Image (tube, grey):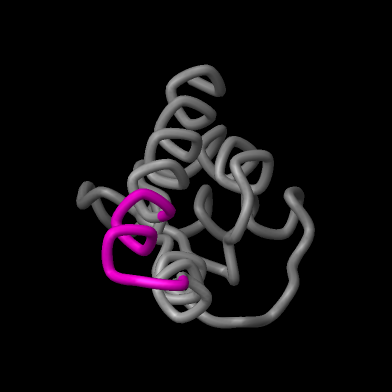
Amino acid sequence: MTGACSSTEQQISKAVKDLKTHTSLPICVGFGIRTPEQAASIAKSADGVVVGSALVKQIETASCPDQAIKNVQSLCYELAKSVKQAR
């Protein structure tokens, strides 16, 4: 599941639960996730959290390639930390 729409935690959790009744494959979710808080919320029910646009935004807004790398690393660290804490 991926996209830029905004869904509630309950809607996403229900969708993941429904999907898991039909497959043993891991379920990954990406609904415009931009913050560590959003990633943690998704991680409570999904097997994986998809973050793409937020990382691209970090690259686009950086003043130079080195800053882009630092921004992406920082966001990845914060996202991963939040997901681990949510589980």
Task: Indicate whether 63 appears above or below 25.
Answer: below
The N terminus is located in which quarter?
Answer: bottom left
- Name the foreground residue: 76 vs 29: 76
Measured from the top left, where is residue 29 in percent x and y? 45, 60
Task: Tell me if residue 67 is in the magenta stretch.
Answer: yes
Magenta span main SS: helix
Task: Tell me if residue 12 is in the magenta stretch.
Answer: no
Q: Determine whether, in the image, residue 20 is placed left or right of residue 53.
A: left
Q: Determine whether, in the image, residue 45 is placed left or right of residue 10.
A: left
Instruction: State the residue at coordinates (51%, 67%).
Output: 54
State how many labels appear: 0
Task: Find residue 65 and report its image quarter.
Answer: bottom left
Task: Find residue 76 and report its image quarter.
Answer: top left
Measured from the top left, where is residue 50 in percent x and y? 39, 60
* View extreme (left): residue: 25
Measured from the top left, where is residue 31 in percent x and y? 57, 69
Instruction: State the residue at coordinates (39%, 34%).
Output: 77
Segment colored magenta: 63-71
Measured from the top left, where is residue 14 in percent x and y? 64, 53
Task: Indicate whether 41 appears above or below 19.
Answer: above
Instruction: State the residue at coordinates (43%, 53%).
Output: 71
- Name the foreground residue: 71 vs 54: 71
Instruction: State the residue at coordinates (21%, 52%).
Output: 25
